[in-house]
Amino acid sequence: MGLSTFRNIFYYSTYNNQTQTLKQMTTIKTRGKVNLIKGRLLYVWSTVIRSEEMKNKAKMKILTGRAQLKYHDQPVKLLRFIGGF
């Protein structure tokens, strides 16, 4: 099942910090098999570099080359993929 396979996802994420919108690049390492299927909800274990509180199970929804990840109840919108898979 590819349990020892790690894949990197590079993306630009937009966070709203009070009155500022911060754009930063984040790297996610996912463990296991991840398929890019349009409209499919994927549950992956992810480790977000630079963000310790986001080390949890993530829900990913693939939308036409874009994706939307939800950590806990806070959505993180992926603007575009840089690489990975």
Image (cartoon, rainbow, N blue to C red):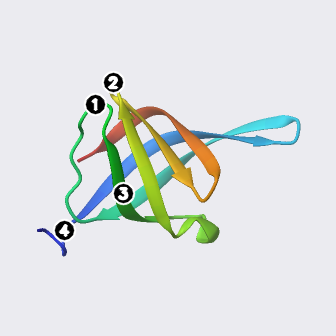
Residue type at tag 1 = Lys
Q: Residue 82: name its quadrant.
A: top left
Do the residues bearing badges 2 and 1 touch, measured as CB atoms within 8 Å?
yes
| 27 with respect to 17 (left or right) | left
The numbered mark at residue 5 is 4
| 34 with respect to 67 (left or right) | left
Q: Which residue is mark 3?
A: 43
User: Relative to 32, does residue 19 appear above or below in the rendering?
Assistant: above
The numbered mark at residue 38 is 1
Q: Residue at x 63, y 69 (%)?
A: 53
Residue type at tag 4 = Thr
Q: Residue at x 60, y 45 (%)?
A: 75
Identify the element where label 1 is drawn.
loop
Between tags 4 and 3, which lies in front?
3
The numbered mark at residue 64 is 2
Do the residues bearing badges 3 and 2 touch, measured as CB atoms within 8 Å?
no
Mark 4 Cα-neighbour bin, 10 Å: few <14, some 14–19, many ≥20: few
Identify the element where label 2 is drawn.
loop
Q: Residue at x 36, y 57 (%)?
A: 43
The numbered mark at residue 60 is none
Mark 3 Cα-neighbour bin, 10 Å: few <14, some 14–19, many ≥20: some
